[in-house]
Image (spheres, rainbow, N blue to C red):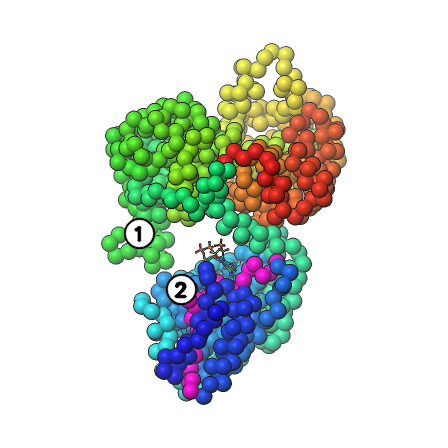
Amino acid sequence: MAATRSLSRTVALIKINHPPVNALSTPVCEALIKEFAEAIKDPSIEAIVLCGANGKFCAGADIREFSSASRRTVSLEGINAEIESSKKPVVAAIEGVALGGGLELALSCHYRVAHIKAVVGLPEVLIGILPAAGGTQRLPRLIGIPAALDIIVRGRHVPATEAFQLGIVDEVVQSSAIDAAVQMARKVIGKPLASRRLSTNTVQYNINVDAFLDTALEKAKRQFRGAQAPLACIDAVRASAQLPYQRGIEKERQLFASLWATGQPQAQQYAFFAERNVGKWTLPSGERWDNVRPCPVRTAAVIGLGTMGRGIVTSLSKANIPVIALEQDTKQLDLGKKAVNGLLEREAEKLKKQGSSSPDGNGLGSVHFTLNFEDLKEVDLVIEAVYENMNLKKEVFRKLSSVMKPDAFLCTNTSGLDIDEIASVTHRPELVIGTHFFSPANIMRLLEVVRGRHTSPTTIATAMSLGKTLGKVAVLVGNCPLFVGNRMLGPYLDQANYLLEEGYYPEEVDQALEEFGFAMGPFRMMDLAGLDVGWRSRMEKGLTGSRVPPGTPARQREGKRYCPLADMLCELGRFGQKSGKGWYQYEKPGGRNARPDPWIRDFLDKYRNTYHIKQQAISPEQILQRCLYALINEGFRILEDGIASGPEDIDVIYNNGYGWPKHRGGPMFHASAVGLHEVLMVLEGYHKANPDVPSMKPSFLLKKLAAVGGPPIKEWRTQLGKLPNKL
Ligand code: 3H9
């Protein structure tokens, strides 16, 4: 039964029962309508408590129904209006979550009681829509415009204690919220309900609402770069202050429909489910997420306390896992310790604010700093995060293999080195795995988990489960140079560099990609990461520096186009933010405010003159096509090589690790939305005119999918089934 009713004397208890999160599917809504109607009609019932089964109130509308052919036939706001107008008091008993339509349902009840560990919120904006069952009209009527706007536009989860302070819930309890709600229901039987019906109230404010919302709108336009849902949320909240309730509801409905027509909700809802699906990994041998048990990680160690190591230690400690942090000498250890302690202090402060610190500590795992490898003997899992150099990593793994207990897992935080080569120096290659964190590792949600040739299913299960414990989105990928995210970045950055050769300036290319929605354009991103990182790797490969054979043309390597601009900047000490100059200039070394640099303009003009490069007229649209389709084409090659198990995996990586705008779903989703034939035509045209850029040669898989009419992304896997799988 989607919703059931039982009785506690004269109080009816209506329970939503739709595992796993009690989402409001059509059958649930139909059952709610029926149960409420009967409870309201039944003369023996004096009050009603609404709750959810299995410790969860309700996670909102059933998102799966939005995209299905059988779009909702039942109006959630209709149900809410029925509940609110009931003459018998209705109390919501909130346990676990009351999100989206779940909170809207609770707001239509006359009273709300929450368990202390519950969270409430209107996170619709995160899936490309707005609360459309009265949430944008009732919440401002309850807590005012600024607080409601903050919750609706950011889609944040509000802990019960804060919800109580804001007035969203009437009581917070440590024990059963259902029992407390029944008690409250009994207390309020016969009391007047008029003031408890939020739709009949007016929004209270003592601010200039228009000016306040205009400022919020401008800020949201800058912050969310092209995402329409936050702007629609602001419009809807404005309606709550300006219009009577019913007209506000009409506005909410109109805004919902116009958002749907933008295609953004479909992209964000695809991304929502993709994030959940990537956790359900499957190996070609049949082992899967649900038939391989992960080993518990009770203690962990981190080797190297550079930027990445510090973030990883903090991340483990945040998950309440005791960590041993190891450095090679006292100076590095002291530096690392100071930095980690600073990060941990900030985390402890956050936990305190959320009320999550426990009475016996600050809620963080202990960190022990050491110089001694022997201290790692008993640890369950180690993450090596030393400098990105194969010989150094092998030296560390040799030591780890001899020191650590035989069943300890050995993880390497590398952004692209060969896992098999690292594993080859150990006695236990089956326990070696890549864990590619993204900087800052205590904040960024992505974790690429890289399977080596010998990595065992248990090791995979353990690394994937650790990712979840750390609050990350872990994606399993195969072992190849640069794995998935960084491998796709190569052709994208090449195109960005070629655009400079052809007449553009860094800020123009960045602007086009930032207007598309990227958090950062390619040149600002390179400056942030440090230009010297790529330069050193190109020197090691003999692409630049003293190992380039004499007579090699400046703009060619092995017959392929090569852009030496970044090398030239590095030779001049322009490494990006860290040196105060790179593609941009900064206020000081380590500064963050990128300003266009006239020196760069001059440098590029001279460069183009030297090599007699004719300026080309390229539209911003073409900038996007060249950079994005280069990235996408490499994504198809990755699928072809069996390095990622599906397009969702690639999209989750880009959405969570590379600043891809979520309202565009991810690069592979974008390709399917644009049309694979269109992508193919552009790549073919470019490659024909530029045969010396092989990365733009359309991939076999793209051609194959385009040839069968460019099927929707969810059907690509059928085609992928016949390709190799390196997972
Ligand atoms: C809405 O309410 C619109 C209204 O304003 C009015 C419209 C007219 N529907 O995340 P998890 C599934 S829009 C369907 O792994 P957790 C999820 O896919 C909705 N399915 O667990 C997964 O399935 P599977 C507004 C949903 O404990 C399983 O549940 N609400 C929904 O880490 C477990 O999920 C939201 O946006 C749903 N609404 O986190 C809330 N929610 O097992 C979205 C979850 O097959 N949900 N599933 O992979 C969440 O934020 C998290 O899922 C939640 C639990 C915090 C609830």
Residue that sits furthest to the top in the current view? 550
Residue drawn at point x = 49 percent, y = 77 percent: 35
- State whether residue 126 is above or below residue 210: above
Percent position (x, y) of residue 569?
A: 56, 26
Q: Based on the displayed image, in which of its 4 quarters is residue 336 positioned?
A: top left
Left or right relative to 312: residue 77: right
Which portion, as a residue range, is magenta?
A: 44-67
The kind of secondary structure element at disc 1 is loop
317 within the magenta span: no
**In the rendered structure, are the residues bearing label 2 and label 1 in contact, judged by CB atoms less than 8 Å apart?**
no
Residue drawn at point x = 26 percent, y = 36 percent: 378
Residue drawn at point x = 52 percent, y = 33 percent: 726
Label 2 – label 1 distance at C-alpha: 26 Å
Percent position (x, y) of residue 171?
A: 37, 72
Type of residue at label 1?
Gly
Percent position (x, y) of residue 224?
A: 57, 52
Of callouts 2 and 1, the N-terminal one: 2
Left or right relative to 107: residue 501: right
| Residue closest to the eye, 281 or 208 | 281
Disc 1: which residue: 363
Left or right relative to 298: residue 160: right
Residue drawn at point x = 69 percent, y = 24 percent: 692
56 within the magenta span: yes
**Total marks in image:** 2
Q: Based on the displayed image, in which of its 4 quarters is residue 640 positioned?
A: top right
Q: Which mark identifies residue 550? A: none
Percent position (x, y) of residue 374?
A: 25, 30
Residue 301 visible to the viewer:
no
Type of residue at label 2?
Asn
Disc 2: which residue: 54
Residue 394 visible to the viewer:
yes
